[in-house]
Image (spheres, rainbow, N blue to C red):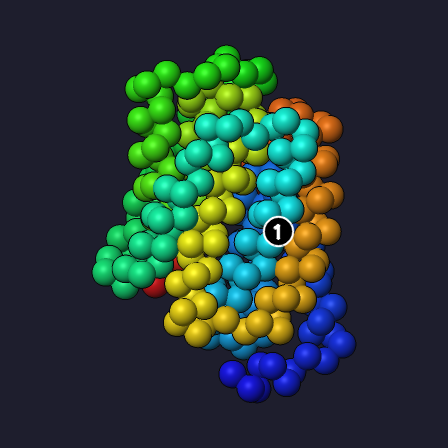
Amino acid sequence: MENFVGSLDPMTIIFIIVAGFISAFIDSTVGGGGLISTPALLSLGLPVPYALGTNKVAASTGALTSVISFWRAGKIKKAALALMPLSFIGSALGAYVVYLLPEKLMKNIIVALLVAVAIYTYRRKDWGDTGTVQQLGAKALIGAFIMAFTIGFYDGFFGPGTGSFLIFGFLYLGYDFVTAAGNAKALNFASGVGALVSFAMSGTIVWSYGIIMAVAMIVGAICGSRLAIKKGASYVRPLYLLVTTLLIGKQVYEILLK
């Protein structure tokens, strides 16, 4: 990977910074930042495994920044923190078995799930405006445990739509949109670190690119999360639907392309 380490010219650095900022700004609220950061890294000539691994370095840093912002604003519940180890374990396992299932099968399944999530959210116009839960009951807690592990596994294994699925899950449990977004970022951070460990062990990370993008993502995550906390559901809900729609379009495009 010496050729990648040695190609840090000024234009490349600026490109990485801009892509990282925009990616984290969006990702800090509703996820989907990988729609920007991963293609950006691929456009620099990184092979797919290295682009994914390098992106995890930056994305994990940005996610941690978002978690801190949401936590300080009281938008992350203790239940979400308790679920983080399950997301971490699930993601590490997912990254480990990444080649066991056909990619096209995964894309078909994910498109169907994302369409269902978008339609359900769009039809419920006032869903997530206010929270309806203070403490999770036993059944809801079991469901949250399963959600944390399975979506964590999916994040390590495949990835696209993780933020959308997590937010949907927390909305379904009764949280408002902003709190659901905060809880989702906590689990997303844990699953990102789990996958990052696997990528680091396999040596598929370009640290110079990852560190530069991580700094940009910290700034983007601070700006994005603060705007989400300030604006509330009126900002988060349409952005959530927009990103989910873009994810659907991306997956459909890739299915038709192949």
Residue 228 seen in this snapshot = no
Residue 126, above or below 99? above
Q: At 58% from the left edge and 81% from the top edge, which residue is drawn?
A: 4
Residues 76 and 216: in front is: 76
Residue 24, above or below 117? below
Residues 170 and 203: in front is: 203
Label 1 secondary element: helix
Residue 71, above or below 248? above
* Residue type, numbered disc 1: Gly
Dividing the picture into quadrants, the one containing residue 100 is: bottom left
Residue 53 seen in this snapshot = yes
Q: Is 114 displayed left or right of 38 in the figure?
A: left
Give percent across and percent down for residue 56: 51, 59
Dividing the picture into quadrants, the one containing residue 120 is: top left
Give percent across and percent down for residue 63: 58, 47
Q: At 27% from the left edge and 63% from the top edge, which residue is drawn?
A: 99
Give percent across and percent down for residue 37: 58, 59
The residue pinned by badge 1 equals 62
Q: Is 223 displayed left or right of 252 in the figure?
A: right
